[in-house]
Image (spheres, rainbow, N blue to C red):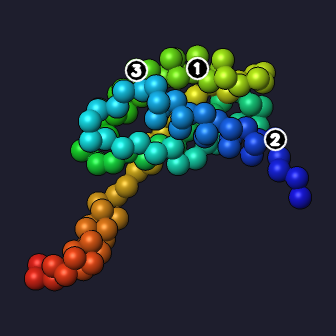
Amino acid sequence: MPISRIARVNKLLLQQISAIMQRELSLPEGAFVTVESVDTSPDLQHAKVLVSIFPDNRQASVRALLDHHIYDIQKIVDKRLHMRPVPKIRFMTAGRNAAEGRVEELLGKIKRGEQEDL
C-alpha cells in the first residue's frame, strides 16, 4: 500500500525539525527536546509539531525559546524542502502528567533496589 503524501510530508518535517533543533538551536543546558510527531493539515498549509520536553521544570523556558525562534526554524525548513506550499509550523507540548512521572520514578527505584519508601 503506498504511503500518502501527508504521511511523507509529516515524516520529512519531523526529520528536518529534529535536525534543526539538534544542530542549530541552542537549548538551555540540561533540557532535552524530542519531536514526537508532526500532524500536517490536508491542504498542507499548517503543521502541528508535538514536542516532548524533559525535565518538566524546563518546559516553560524551552517552550518560550521555541516560540521565540519559530520564524528562524520556519525559514530553515522553507529553504531545505523542495515543495510548495511548505506548511507553517506550530509547536505543541506533549503533556506528561504527574501520575506518569510518579510511575517512572517508582519503576526506577524498583530497578535500583530502593524499596524502602515505595
Q: Residues within 10 Å of mark 3 (few under 14, many from 20)?
A: few
Q: CA distance from mark 2 to mark 1?
A: 21 Å
Circle 1 SS class: helix
Corner quadrant of residue 46: top right
Judge whether 68 appears above or below 16 on screen.
above
User: Disc 2 designates what residue?
Assistant: 5
Corner quadrant of residue 100: bottom left
Going by the numbered disc 1, the residue's amino acid type is Ile
Residue occupying the point 27% across, 71% down? 108
User: Disc 3 designates what residue?
Assistant: 68
Mark 3–mark 1 CB contact (< 8 Å): no
Going by the numbered disc 3, the residue's amino acid type is His
Judge whether 35 appears above or below 68 on screen.
below
**Which numbered disc, 3 or 1, marks the residue that appears first in the sequence?**
3
Residue occupying the point 26% across, 41% down? 30
**Nearer-the-camera pick, 95 or 56:** 56
- Please give the label number shown on residue 76: 1
| Residue found at the far right of this picture | 1
Tell me where residue 41 appears, x and y as whole percent. Answer: 71, 36
